[in-house]
Image: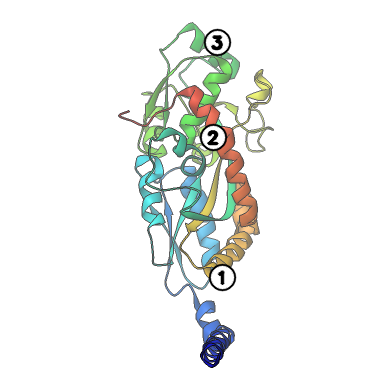
Amino acid sequence: MTQHLHITRRQLLANTAASALALSPAFANAEAAWPTKPLRLVVPFAPGGSSEIVARALAGEMAKTIGQNVFVDNKPGGAGNIAMQEVANATDDHTLILGHIGTLAVNQYIFPKLPYDPNKDFTPITLISKVPSLYVVHPDLPVKNLKEFVAYAKANPGKLSYGSAGNGSAGHLAFEYLKMATDTFMLHVPYRGTGAMLTDLMAGRLDAAAAGAPALLQFIKAGKLRCIATGSSARLPLLPDVPTVAEQGFKGFEMTQWYGLMAPSKMPKAHIDKLEKEAIAAARGKVVHDKLSQDTALAIGNTRAEFEAFIKLEQARWKPVIARAQIKPEGI
């Protein structure tokens, strides 16, 4: 009994000391001081696409209040899987990643084995933005809208090609979704990034593509690309004369890309809490809202619980689409 009381008292003293440490100013200051060096926000795609625009908008605002610079690091390859694996294994507590419809909701149904688990290896922080997909063609293609494009594709089966940022990318999914809705067939040409794909599209080496509005608007306005439809549920203020896919005879059709901030699941909860607070404030702030609105992207900034629930819904939505389209990674 004496030994048991001795052990109990020892444990009580240890617990009391731990509680006192947690409440001490030094401990609190150490937590408040995080981050202690610049935060690295990995974008798992090549420069030039919607992902980089969204990431830089958020990073710039978070850097103003979180106490350190937040720099964007593009790490393309493997449909985002390479960067996701790297960040999942990061242990420096200063590495984050831009989550995406592909890496979080689609890749697990495309690749036989992922080098990461989207639900276990990452903690969702906030859904930053939703980006409407735009369907564009080279100006020399003799079509002015989606109805004419579909008619042309059916009259020329297999002769049209469309590009994307890679197998399983949002642009690939958007066009496969459109092909299913319109019962058309076109050749898919995957690239390593949106920038390279757009270069070939504007040069006439491709006929069409789908991508996020931020990456395309400047080229549409310059007349280098023609937008034949938007994947949004309503017409976009910056493209008021371009009807939606749904308006052009395909009721209920909607296609948006989305991007969210993710951290490795190993990151301490105190850091996650701080990231959530700072990221939500940045995403909901006027600067990010205005920057993304200029490119027809919608700023969100929801809670991490809401973002986690959203990811699960998206996974359930895309699983049957992937199976029907039989999308496979390159080489399989």
Vertical position of residue 282 compared to residue 176: above or below = below
- How many numbered callouts? 3
Vertical position of residue 31 compared to residue 100: above or below = below
Q: Is residue 320 left or right of residue 330?
A: right
Q: CA distance from mark 2 to mark 1?
A: 35 Å
Quadrant of the frame with the N terminus: bottom right
Q: Nearer the viewer, residue 284 or 220?
A: 284
Q: CA distance from mark 3 to mark 2?
A: 25 Å
Q: How is the image coloured?
A: rainbow
Q: Nearer the viewer, residue 295 or 162?
A: 162
Tell me the number on the disc at residue 48.
Answer: none
At numbered mark 2, what does the secondary structure look like: helix, strand or loop? Answer: helix
At numbered mark 3, what does the secondary structure look like: helix, strand or loop? Answer: helix
Outermost residue, top side: 155
Q: Nearer the viewer, residue 85 or 244?
A: 85
Mark 2: few, some, or many residues within 10 Å (few <14, many ≥20)? few
Give amino acid for label 3.
Ala
Give amino acid for label 2.
Lys
Which residue is at 46% across, 68% downward?
Answer: 69
**Dot 1 and dot 3 residues touching (CB under 8 Å):** no
At numbered mark 1, what does the secondary structure look like: helix, strand or loop? Answer: helix
Judging by the rendered image, the residue that carries numbered circle 1 is 65
**Dot 3 and dot 2 residues touching (CB under 8 Å):** no
Q: CA distance from mark 1 to mark 3?
A: 53 Å
Which residue is at 54% across, 57% downward?
Answer: 58
Judging by the rendered image, the residue that carries numbered circle 2 is 221
Give amino acid for label 1.
Thr
Which residue is at 38% across, 61% downward?
Answer: 90
Residue 164 at what x, y percent from top left?
42, 31
Judging by the rendered image, the residue that carries numbered circle 3 is 151
Question: Splitting the image into 4 quarters, where does residue 318 fall?
Answer: top right
Q: Is residue 284 visible?
A: yes
